[in-house]
Amino acid sequence: MSYLLKRIVFYVFTAWAAITINFFIPRAIPGDPVQALITRSRGQMTTEAVQSLYVLFGLDKDASLAEQYFSYLGQLLRGDLGLSFTYFPSPVSQVLGDGLPWTLGLVGITTVLGFLIGTALGTGIGWRRGSWADALIPVTTFVSSIPYFWLGLIAIALLTGPDSFFPASGAYDNGLVPNPDLEFIGSVVQHGILPAFTILVSSMAGWILSMRNMMVTVASEDYVTVAHAKGLSDRRVMVGYAARNALLPNVSGFALSLGFIVGGTLLVEIVFSYPGLGLQLFQAVGAKDYPLMQGIFLIITLSVLLANFLADVAYLALDPRTRREG
Amino acid sequence: MTVVPTTGTATPVAAPVKRRRLRFVANPKATTGLVILGFFALVAIIGPWIAPYDPSGRSNDLLQGPSAAHWFGTTHLGQDIFSQVVVGTRSVIVVGFIAGIVATILSVLVGVTSGYLGGAGSELLSALSNVFLVLPALPLMIIITSTLPETSTLTIALVIGLTSWAWGARVLRAQTLSLRGRDYVEAARATGEKTWRIILFEILPNLTAVIASGFVGTVIFAVTLEITLAFIGIGAGGDWNWGTVLYWAQSQQALAQGAWWWFVPAGLAIALLGTALSLVNFGIDEFVSPRLRGGGKTNVKTADGHTVRMRVGFTPVLATKAGPEGRETP
Amino acid sequence: MTDAVLEIRGLNVDYGLGEDAVHAIRDVDLTLHRGEVLGLAGESGSGKSTLAYGLTRLLPPPGVITGGEVLYHPDGGDPVDVLRMDHAALRRFRWAETAIVFQGAMNSLNPVHRISTQLTDVIKAHDPRGTSAARLARARELLHLVGISADRLESYPHQLSGGMRQRVMIGMALALEPKVVIMDEPTTALDVVVQRQILRQLVELRERLGFSVVFITHDLSLLVEFSDRIAIMYGGRIVEEAASADLYRDPLHPYSHGLLNSFPALRGPKRELTGIPGSPPDLRGMPSGCAFHPRCPHAMERCGVEVPVLGVPPDKSTTAHVAVDQRSPADRTVACWLHPVHDDGF
Ligand SMILES: Nc1ncnc2c1ncn2[C@@H]1O[C@H](COP(=O)(O)OP(=O)(O)O)[C@@H](O)[C@H]1O
Ligand SMILES: [Mg+2]
């Protein structure tokens, strides 16, 4: 089986696992899951909300667990994720549709950018090991230990204010109507800079450290010594020989830690009241909006799987050993 | 979490174990990390006794900046933030370590079993860890904890532990696979040694560093996750932790009111604890993979007083005349 | 054949600095003549690789060169000291004048680049004006030279067998027609048949292209077969140097004697294999006097006190009073109190 096909099978399997987890977690609680959720919400639920939960869990009809499971799968295939309480009576899928583009734009771009910039900086620091650049490592370690959302809080405290260029919340000026004109786009960029900067700084730090370590490890590989012995330029040895190989474990590390990074970046949305999935998740937690939480878990999982797949494709392009050739 | 790939193969050195152990403690990064960690552990133990106030107790000093009476200031209810941070340390440390221990045990079980036994079962375990690895941790934790009837510090620690073993299992599986092919393991197998004895006495001792580094990594992960959950309001009942402090700061608009003291101390405490744990892990990495070691001096003085940097590819030349014992060139 | 192309004088190499330093190479003098194959032998750990990397300044940290000269004699030019070159000069010098085939040739190729890229980038680095078509043609020619078909150009290293990778490295070493090729155990990881095949090919190429070779191995019988002269290393020093036939027939140093008896010779009279008792010295605690004396069957009192000087043994040479750098390849030197050298030798 070719490498990509294997990966695709794995992702389909994981997606199925996520869906199944979604199905079983509320049922793992002894008794009626809806009753349990009602208890937890301390009576904040409307009767419609309760009813929609019964529908979501397939408990409205008298059905066996297997029947419930398959009807759940069927609902998912139709894109039916139930009704959100917070945005009642909007369907969850519609709520997600509103939030997803903002999250993809903010989190997607900054995560990738953070990886690229961090890797580039780590390459330089690892190559100039023993020079002044090493002094950056303790700082980087400290920054990488700061939770994303706290850095966001600090950024807001320091950089926003009544007469600051940076707005403290939202994705665009409230007075504007979303349409693709220059004013709106300008406002989106203006609102995006600070959250993006927060995510960039926090996510970069980890990549700097791991790329630096990989560079140090790779620098003593035989083929790097050969490259020096060949009299190649310093740049060529650093980029074409050392970094090119050090990049490989970093790319697979990127794929594997996406699931974690995304969690951290979603919180930045909360701090900046950025109208993406993270903020919705926060609201769902506050309102005990279980269908919305489930929907967000699913959509984030699927996005992470897709991103993982793209990282796999990148890895495939970067490492000839995974390619099957004659 | 910093994802620093563990590159070293655990080198089986039998004799100088003592010296190696000493070298780990002598590693300045590990030592610094351990000292900070010890400080936090101490606060976790004695925190409730040394806290000057009841962390939930209200007073009339509403939203005051740091002062002699309230080192970290007060909240909108007049609660002492210093006491909240000090008392909250225990929950953070407890969750970190319980989750770390649970996840480490699971990762050793899954990783070593699937690495050593091979076959279809091994592939299945490996696929299982990969699934847990790519599932986004935070949303998963949220839907799990939202359905739990009760969330205490302990349940949070257990849930984190039960869901975060995959990274360690993956690394351990790879290491076990490579150890399995070593001569002494093959030899033990050939002589009919029992499987559990081989795993216990031949494999596990060589995985110590990897297991330790996985443990520390999970503690970092668990602490961050607990604080994050608390920050979005999935807290552990009435227990204080640094995340709860930040949750109240955020929900009471501390920022808008300029109450920086409300969220700065807890955040710095998180960063400091995270840094300490990372330093311990760097120490372990350098211990396992000597290439990463600083190796003391990297700058060398030449005979004519220049300073050159030691680097791969351009060996420094300290003196160009013949060495001290050498003959003069004719 | 008598003029030198590479002269090493008083070379000293340490690993580490100050107190912790181990002296891996001590006062090594060695001359490589034009067109010859100089063999360098010794047990593993005797410093052969350190010498090879030291003279090209490719030692990994914490290696430092603490003294000496490495003089390279270009065709009809003044000698230059490799150890005094700045980085730019060193880059120009490398591969164009001296190329190396490394000990770990299995890992010498960059796994992510095609063979063609790795053959052409070195040509481009030293001659940026050439066209890429010309470089590719040269790469094809190089593969042909080492007996690999040109359609392997587009392969990645992992698609080649160990022997093929080694040949590619040899071909790469010849890319810029260097005057000196240093080979550090180039065939140790290969099986015996492939090993000899590659070496035979190398000797043939040397005759055709006229470069000099420093050939490093711990297998003395290979050297006897393939090299003109042999230098024996022990504990970071050269202990004997002689024409290979002389060394084979009549090793003067007890260590050379022991080494010869550790390997079965392919040709010539059969010897009884005895090996050398004991183990190579620990560089951190070198024995006093001659480093070999604790293992030496002929050790005398003097051996434990004074370090023997490398010189021309009086009883073996007809040209004992000729200065060192003018000696003919037939001359030999040894560092052993069994053969004390003339004091007026230098
Ligand atoms: N990186 C290093 N650091 C410290 N000592 C080293 C290093 N590399 C080699 N040595 C020491 O230098 C001596 C010579 O090694 P080497 O040149 O590799 O020997 P050979 O090639 O003859 O087997 C050995 O005793 C070895 O222990
Ligand atoms: Mg060697």
Image: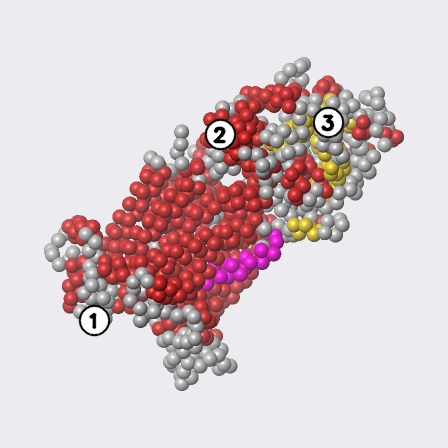
Q: Which residue is rendered at x = 60% and y = 33% of the image?
A: C102
Q: Is residue A147 magenta?
A: yes
B326 vs B115, left or right, is: right
Is residue A112 visible in this depiction of the protein? yes
Counting from the top left corner in percent of width and height, residue A182 is at: 35, 63
Check the residue under mark 1 and report the chain it is in. A
Classify residue A222 by image quadrant. Answer: top right
How busy is the neighbourhood of tag 3: few (under 14 within 10 Å), some, or many (20 plus)? many
Question: Residue beneath label 3, please?
Answer: C33
Is residue A36 visible in this depiction of the protein? no
Identify which amino acid the numbered label 3 is placed on: His
Q: Compared to A240, does A195 lie above or below?
A: below
Question: Residue beneath label 2, please?
Answer: C153
- Sequence order check, earlier mark of 2 and 3: 3
Counting from the top left corner in percent of width and height, residue B232 is at: 34, 66
What SS does tag 2 mark?
helix
Q: Check chain identity for marks 2 and 1: say if they share one.
A: no
Q: CA distance from mark 2 to mark 3?
A: 34 Å
- Our reading of the magenta stretch's main secondary structure is helix
B279 vs B103, left or right, is: right
Counting from the top left corner in percent of width and height, residue A102 is at: 33, 60
What SS does tag 1 mark?
loop
User: Which quarter of the figure is the C terminus of chain C placed in?
Assistant: top right
User: Which quarter of the figure is the N terminus of chain C placed in?
Assistant: top right
Residue range highlighted in magenta: A129-150
Check the residue under mark 2 and report the chain it is in. C
Identify which amino acid the numbered label 1 is placed on: Gly
Which residue extends farthest left?
A: A62
Question: Residue beneath label 1, please?
Answer: A43
